[in-house]
Each structure stands twice: as structure tokens, then as C-alpha cells.
Amino acid sequence: MKFKKIVLAGGSGYLGRVLANYYSEKAQEVVVLSRTQKETENNMRTVVWDARTRGKWTAELVNADMLINLCGKNVNCRYTESNKKEILDSRMVPTLLLGEVISGLFEPPKLWINITSATIYRHAEDHAQDEQMGEIGSGFSVDICKAWENAFYQYQTAKTRKINLRMAIVLGKEDGVFPRLLNLTRLGIGGKQGNGEQYISWVHELDVARSTEWFFDKPELEGTFNCSSPNPVKNSAFTHILRKLSGMPLGLPAPAWLLTIGAAIIGTETELILKSRWVLPTKLQSSGFKFSFNDLAPAIFDILKTN
């Protein structure tokens, strides 16, 4: 086995399952830090933590090959004051706790990857945003991202290399955004959203997992990286490709005013749909990483063929 231990903090969600399955074939053991106990499955086991206080779970970090932090309440909700607080706390508190624990370990994890969000960049329809030339945006979501990244760097971890991984929308088979978009498309309401000019930065779930292994293999890499396909597309193109590959010739569009009403009804925010996220993985590609899925159509085809 290439790895002895991979630790996934907050790894019980969709992306955590993707990473656990990926590393189950590469590591002697995969440890998921979760609030809920689950039965051990092959070499994957769950260790309970509350994500707020020290406990027996801290022993799992000792000499781990890699820690990947996935903690954070889903932002697919209304931005009420209580939800805002929970979104912030669910990111800040575990990240600060992990930093405090790691900074005091004699044999800490070799690599700590913090999964943050590419939504930190501004709404962009004029040009792409990357790690060097990108402009940080404004608003609640951006403020969350900035505070989260500051928390990640608050503690000095001399023995643990850090990667701040700004994640685009992850497309995959089992959960996340894609199955929901596919259901809308199959219902005939998969047309463009808003004016369709906003960009969607996306990444296939396999490339997310592969990128984390790439960072481990490249000890010279540290700091902030975008994890996003090098070919983001406009919303109108995204919905067109999804309709074509799923066999739906038509899809009713959803103008912005209708999205506003619909978002209020289903308990979400239109920002998640209408913000233009035009993000490029400049540093990741410059390091030599090759995406398995550069373009959207092959990525969607791969997902659909296994559904």
C-alpha cells in the first residue's frame, strides 16, 4: 500500500465518500472523523468527534500521511442569521481545532489539505480568475471563504505541509449538484438559468481525488490552488450539453425572477445559480497535473454511463 493512513475530517458527506473509496485501494486504512458512528467497512473506519473539542480522535492524526478537512454545513439554504452563523462556525471551529492539535503534535500529518471554495472570487463574465490574477469578491459567501482560509493559516505547522484547495462545483455519480441537475433536465425544465451567460466552473469527482494524491507526491507544492477543470462553460452551454447527453431535446428556461421565487420556496439562494464562477486551475496545471476530464461533455458522459 502506498499510504499507511488517510484521515478525512468531516468525511461522511458526498465528497468524503468519494475520497474514502478512492483511498481505500491505496491506503492501509482510511479514517473518517464524523459526529455519527458507522460500522467499519473493509479498511475504512469511523472515529467519532464533535468537531469542537479535543478527544481520543486526536491520536488518529499522529503520523498520518494526509489529513483532508471537508467540514462545513451545506450552503444550499436560505441565508438567515441562524444559518449564516452555522455556515461560519461549521468551517471555522473545526479548522481552528485541527490547526491547534496539529501544531502541538510531535509527529503530525505530513500533509493537510483544506477543502475550501472557488466562490471566493468575484462574479466574473469578463475574464477568468486564477490564483495569481484573480480578484476576491464581496458578500456573505466570500466573507465566509476569507475567514475560513485565515483560520487555516492561523496556526504554524512546521512539520505539516498545507494546501488550501479552492474547489469548483464537483460533478459525480452519487450525490452533490449533478443528480439534481439531471433530475430537472429529465423533467423538461433543464433550460438555461437566468440569462445563461454566467460561467460554471466544474470538476469531475475523480480529478478531485487524483489532485489530492498529486499534492502528496509533490512535496514542493504548498499554498493556495484552484481545483477546477481548465474549461469552464457558460450556463447555457452546460444545460445544452446535459440535455443532449441525457436525451432531452428541450428544456424550459428559468429567468432570474422565477429563480428568485423558486429559491424562496425550496429554501436556497439564487446566488448559487446566478453567480458567474469563471475559475482556472493555473497553478495545478503548471505543476504538471493532467486532468482526466478537461471538457464537460466527456465528464458528463462518464457520469451518465454508470447511472
Image (tube, grey):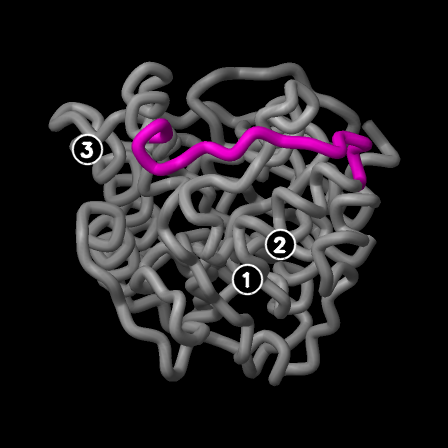
Residue 106, located in which quarter of the rendered image?
Answer: bottom left
Q: Residue at 63% across / 78% down in the picture?
A: 285
Residue 291, located in which quarter of the rendered image?
Answer: bottom right
Answer left or right for 247 relative to 274.
right
Q: Is residue 35 magenta?
A: no
Q: Which residue is mark 3?
A: 84
Q: Which residues are magenta?
A: 245-259
Q: Which residue is mark 1?
A: 227
User: Does label 2 or label 3 sit earlier along the sequence?
Assistant: 3
Q: Position of residue 114 (x, y in %)?
A: 43, 55
Q: Main secondary structure of the magenta part?
A: loop
Q: Secondary structure at mark 3?
A: helix
How packed mark 3 is, by other alpha carbons closer than 10 Å (few <14, some 14-19, many 20 or more), is some
Answer left or right for 146 relative to 68.
left
Q: Residue at 42% across / 75% down in the picture?
A: 127
User: Does label 1 or label 3 sit earlier along the sequence?
Assistant: 3
Amino acid tagged 2: Val
- Closer to the camera, 60 or 261? 261
Residue 117 appears in the rendering: yes
Report how far apart the C-alphas of labels 1 and 3 lie in the structure.
25 Å
Q: Is residue 252 magenta?
A: yes
Amino acid tagged 1: Cys
- Closer to the camera, 211 or 168? 168
Residue 160 appears in the rendering: no
